[in-house]
Image (tube, grey):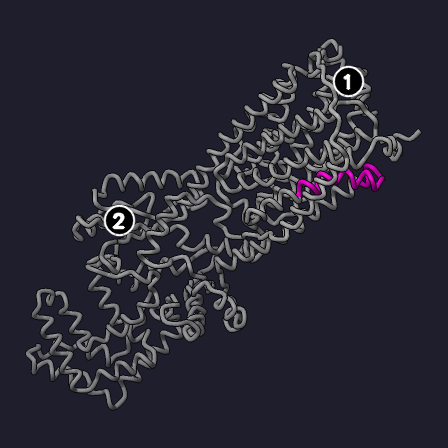
Amino acid sequence: MMFASLYSLLSRHRRLLHWGTAVAIVLSIVAFSRVRMREDIRAMLPDGQSEAATGFRLLEQTPAARKFLVNLHRGPDTPPEVLLATANRLAAAMGSPWFTRATAGIPPESGEAFLAWLVHALPSIATDGDLQKVASRLNADDIRRQLDEDYARLLSPEGWAMKRLIQVDPLDFRAISLERMRYINLMPNLRLQDGHFISADGQDALILADATVAVTDSGRTTELLAHFQRLVREIVPPGIEVSFISGHRYTAANADAIKHDLVVVLTVSSLVLLAIYLTCLRSWRALYVFLMPAAVLCLAGLAVSVFYGTVSAITIGFGAVLLGIADDYGIHVFFSLRDDKKDPVTIMRDVSLPILFAGATILGAFGVLLFSDLPGQRQLAVFSVVGIGMTLAVSLLLLPHLLLPTTGAPVAPEPVSRARRAPPPRGLVLGVWLAVLVFFGWQCTQLTFNGDFRAMTRVPPEIVTAEKTIESTWGNLRNHAILFSPGPDLASALALNDRVFEFWRDQLPAGGLVSLAPLLPGPAVAAANRERWVEFWRDEARCGVGDLVQKEGIRLGFATRAFAPFSALVSTAPAPTSVEDLRQAGLGAWLDSLIVEADGQVMVLTMVPDTPATMDIFARNAALMPGVRLVSPSSISRTLRQSVGADFVRLTGLAAAVVLGLLLLFFRDLKKVAVSLVPVVTSLLVAIGALAMFHVELTVFNVIAAVLVIGLGVDGGVFMVCKIAGGHDHDTERAMRVSSLTTMAGFGGLILARHPALHSIGITVLLGISTELFAVLWVIPALYRPADAPSLAEPLPAQAP
C-alpha cells in the first residue's frame, strides 16, 4: 500500500520529476568523472594482519620490488666489445629522475678497491676454517712459490695495477675472501668479465637498476617504461636484443588491460543493452529504463570513493554487470504498466511486493561480500548494495512516472498479438532438470582452487618471453623464499642475520643460501673474528711469517720494505669493516638488494630455496630464530589457495543462509521458499560444475561470481513464485526473458575483457544465467502449479484481512 500511496502523491509532480531526473543524471556523471581509480591488483589481495597480507607487504618493501633487470643479447655478427660498450652506455643513461644505481658490473675504478677490500676484510670475516686455510699457505715452500708468481705478475702488462695489492697480500689471502662471494650470488650463471656482468657463454650482458617509481603507481609506471623504451631505441644498435623484467611491467600490463576493458566492456554492454531495450520494449520511454542504471552506476562509484578514497578499476569494470542487473526491476515495472489494463495505482501495489522481495534477497547476497578478507570484494559489496538499493528506489518511486505520459494516462502499448505457447511436458522438464543437476553436481567434485598471484593478473606474451630469456640466461631468480631479520638499527639486524646464517648454512646444499653474513657479519661476530685473527698471528709458530716473506722477497729482487703493509696486516689490530667499505668496493648493488629500511626498522634479507622442505625446516626451528619472518611466494600462493577455498565455502554459504532467511521471512511457506531456490541451485551447480569440467581452477574472482549467481538466481525465482502464488496476470515471463537478456549482455561484455578478474566473473556468471532462465520459466511452473498455490497475501500479516 505504501508504494501505491507514494505513486498517487508523486503523480501530481511528473513534469518536475522529469526535469529533476535529467539534472540528477548529468550531475552524477560529472561527479563520477572525478572519482580516483586504482588500476593495480592490490584491491584483490588480502589486507589486515593475515599471513598472506603481511607477506605481500614485506615483499613490496624489498628492493627487488623496484629492481630492473635488463638483458642484452648479442647476435652472431656482433663483437663482444660492442655488447659491453652498449651495456655501459645504456646503464649510464638510466639515471635520475627515473632510475638510481644502474650498473652493468663492478666499475673499473672499483676493481682495485674490491681486491683491496677482500684483503682488509679478511680479519673481520675469517672463520676457524678460513684460518686453517691461511695456515696451510705459511710453509716456506708455498711462500716461495707464491712470491715467484707475484714477481712474474708484476712483470706482466697489468703488473703496475697489482703493485699495492701484492704489497699487502703477497700470499693471496684474498682468494679465501673471494670464496665467500658465492653467498651473495643471486644469479647462478653470472660471471664477472672486464668489470661487466656477463653470461657463462659470453653472449649476454646484464644491467641492474633501481627505479624511483613505486610498483603500485600505475600512472608514473607508464611514463617510466616509455622513458626506458626510448633509451633503448636511441642507444642500442642493430644486432643486440634487449629483454627486461620488472614489477613495473606487470603493473603497466594490468593497468592497460583494465583501461582497455573499461572502454570495451562498458561500451559494448551499453550498446547491446540499448539495442535490447529498443527491440524488446519498443518504446522511446525505454530510454529511461536504460539511463536509470547508468546514473545509479555513477552514484554507486561515488559511494565507494566516499568509503575507500580510491576505487579499484575492477570495481568500475563490474559496472557493466550492474547495468545488466539494475535494470531488472525497471523492466518488470515497464511490462507491468504496459501490458496490464489495470489502474497504475493497482499495478504498483501488486508489482512492488515481488520487486522488494527480489531486491532484498539480492542485496543480502551481495552484502555478504562485506565480510571478505579482500578489500576489492568489500568495495564490490558497497558498489552493488548502493547500486541495487538505489535502483529499487528509482524503479518503484520514480520510474513509473517517467514511463507514463505527464497527463497520467496509461501507457499506450503497441498492439501485440501473441498466443501463449503451451509449456513443455512436465515430466520432460523435470527429467532434464534432474539430469542436469546430477551431471554438473558430479563435476563439482573435481573442483580445484588457484591462489597463484599470476592467476589474478594479466601477463602478456612479451613479458613471458622476457622471463624465459632471463631465466635461461642467468638462472631461476624467482624460486627463492626470503628470511627477514629485523632490528631497530643495522647492527641489531646484522646480529640476528648472523644467527640465521649459522643455522641455515648447515641445512642447505652449496649454492642454496644467499646471505650477507659471510661478508658483513654483525658487530659481535666481526669483533670475535678480529680477536681470533690477532691470536692466530700471535702464535709462536707464525710470528716469523712477516720476516720470512720479507727475506724471500729480497732474494727475488723486491725492495727491502716492499712487504711492510703485509707485516702490518698480520701484526697489528685490524680495523672493522663497514657498509661504506663494501660500497666503495663496488658491492653496493648487492647491499641494496639485501638490506631494507622500512617502518622505522632495518631488515637484512636472506634467500633460501622456496621448497616444501625449506618451509618444514623453518616451521620446526622457528624458535631458534626469534623475530625472523619467512616469506615464501609458494607459501603465499598456498595460503591464498586455501583462502579462496575457504572464502568460497564461507561466502557462498553465508549468502545462501541470508537468502534462505529472507525467503522464510517473506514467504513463511517452506514450499515457496524451496521453489524460489530452484534457480539458485541450478545456476550455481551448472556454473561451478562447468568450470570444473573444463579444468578451470577457481580464483578469488570466481568467489565473487558465485555470490552473484546466488543473488541473480533467487531474483528470478522470487518473481515467478510471486506471480504464480498471487495469480497476477502481469507479463512476468516476458519481463524475465528481457531481464535475462540484459544481464547476459552485461556479463557478455565481461567475456571480452583481457584482464583475468573481469573475464573470470563474466564466464562464471554467464554459465549460471544461461540455466537460470530455464529454471525460472520451465522448472518452477512444473514444480509449483497454480492449483496448489495459495494467494501470496495469505502468509503475510500486513495483507491479512
The residue tagged 2 is 91
Distance (Cα) linking label 2 and label 1: 75 Å
Q: Is residue 727 shown left or right of residue 684?
A: right
- Quadrant of image for the N terminus: top right
Callout in the foreground (2, 1): 1
Dot 2: element: helix
Please rate how many residues cluster around mark 2, counting C-alpha atoms within 10 Å: few if below 14, some from 14 to 19, many from 20.
many
Q: Earlier in the sequence, mark 2 or mark 1?
A: 2
Residue 109 in view of the camera: no
Q: Is residue 526 magenta?
A: no
The residue tagged 1 is 340
Furthest toward the top, the residue is 407
> Which amino acid type is marked by label 2?
Ala
Please rate how many residues cluster around mark 1, counting C-alpha atoms within 10 Å: few if below 14, some from 14 to 19, many from 20.
some
Q: Is residue 82 shown left or right of residue 467?
A: left
Residue 590 in view of the camera: yes
Which percent across, then down, holds residue 47?
57, 50
Q: Is residue 669 magenta?
A: yes
- Quadrant of image for the C terminus: top right
The secondary structure making up most of the magenta span is helix
Dot 1: element: loop
In this rendering, the answer to whether 571 lies above or below 97 is below
- Magenta stretch bounds: 664-684
Q: Residue at x 35, y 61 (%)?
A: 186
Which percent across, then down, holds residue 318?
57, 35
Furthest toward the left, the residue is 557
> Which amino acid type is marked by label 1?
Asp
- The answer to which quarter of the image holds residue 309 is top right
Which percent across, then down, holds residue 619?
54, 69
User: Which residue is more in the foreground, 799 or 119?
Assistant: 799
